[in-house]
Amino acid sequence: MPPLAGWTLWITGFVGKAPALDHVMHLLVNDFFIPLCICLIMLALWLGHSDRLKRDRIQITVMYASVSIGISALVVKLINAFTNPWPRPFLVDDSVIRESARRAAETIFYFPHDPTFPSNGATIAFAAATGVWLGNRTAGAIIYVLATLWAVARFYAGIHFFVDIAGGAVIGILTALFISKIFMPRIEPLPTWVMKLCRLLYLA
Amino acid sequence: MALDYFILVFISSLGVYQIAAIHAKLDGLCFFRHPVVQYIFGILAIIGALGWFFTSKDRNIHTTVEGSQQLGLFLASIVASYLFTAILASIMQARVSSKGGSPREGKQYDMGIETLKKTTLFGGIMSSLRRERKDKV
């Protein structure tokens, strides 16, 4: 069992008490809703600036954020390949936590069986938020809010421990900082060539 | 589920392109002449697609559309939607005006979608071809 496992018992205890909240969480926890909202915001940023130089800058930011999403997902895969420190909350030995999480997952989501640590959703959402935030504070803040909502919904649904979510967020943030600040500037002129190809194809 | 997700992304990104085109003044991507109509179309496309996707079935089920497949479908769908937008806007605008008569000043790999401020996708391609021909001569 991970540290702070008791928090899962506390948060899943709310499931079933407020049907309106359960409905909202049912939407927020979905595999498609928040990722799509984040991607649509990034798409709007990619195109939505009338000034050419500002648009070029924000497109670089979006490209770095997209690479950060891909690399952070790869980092999660690598971590999962070498370690699986604890099971999902609805599979743990402690029967009180297990039953509470099982009831929450059944009501709000489904029973995923891939490794729980780190949370894949939190990792990619926070990587996207950090990547975008480095180039556009407002859009970055909006994506941080969406990432937090997604992470909280997955915690509420009893499919992750708090440590899974926090670990995913930290991995996502650090990966995005590394990609945007260190890795991508070092591999120039490759990003510039990609941008030129996109411009040639009327995509950027 | 994969097809449903593709349609969701296709229609919602269509809405995003229409709204973004107003902000970026990319007339070559616009379906409508009035920005208000275009805004309404864009918002309805986004809300309509999300509404349809999440109310037609329970989407909180285990599916094969996750991770890399979700990313692949998303990328394919936004590119298809972009091409659809650019081609449809070219056809619609060709009926009302014939823009892009003269060759452009810069190279396309420098100009990018900036070209779509003054002309449509078809107009931009024709302009590029004319420029290439002129350079050869």
Image (cartoon, coloured by chain):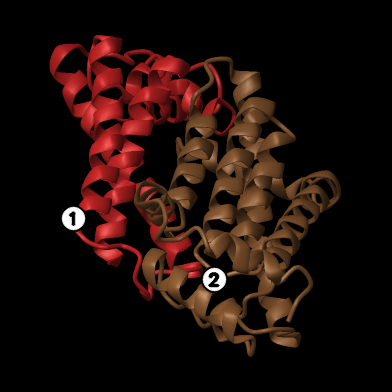
Chain colours: A brown, B red
SS assignment at label 2: loop
Question: Which quarter of the image is occupied by the N terminus of chain A?
Answer: bottom right
A145 horizontally vs B71: left or right: right
- Whether B33 is drawn above or below B17: the answer is above
SS assignment at label 1: helix
* In front of the other: B115 or A155: A155
Q: Position of residue B12 (x, y in %)?
A: 32, 40
How many labels, in total? 2
- Whether B105 is drawn above or below A199: the answer is above
Residue at coordinates 36% horizontally, 40% vertically from top-left? Answer: B13
* In front of the other: A81 or A182: A81
Disc number for residue B56: 1
Residue at coordinates 44% horizontally, 74% vertically from top-left? Answer: A103
Q: Position of residue A68 (x, y in %)?
A: 68, 54
Determine the chain carrying the residue at label 1. B
Would you say residue A193 is visible in this rendering?
no
Please identify the quarter of the rendering in which residue A26 is found: bottom left
Mark 1 and mark 2: span between their CA atoms? 25 Å
Residue type (three-letter) at the residue carrying disc 2: Ile
Q: Position of residue A38 (x, y in %)?
A: 51, 44
* In front of the other: B133 or A71: A71
Q: Position of residue A14 (x, y in %)?
A: 50, 58
Residue at coordinates 42% horizontally, 24% vertically from top-left? Answer: B20
Residue designated by label 2: A159
Would you say residue B95 is visible in this rendering?
yes
Residue type (three-letter) at the residue carrying disc 1: Ser
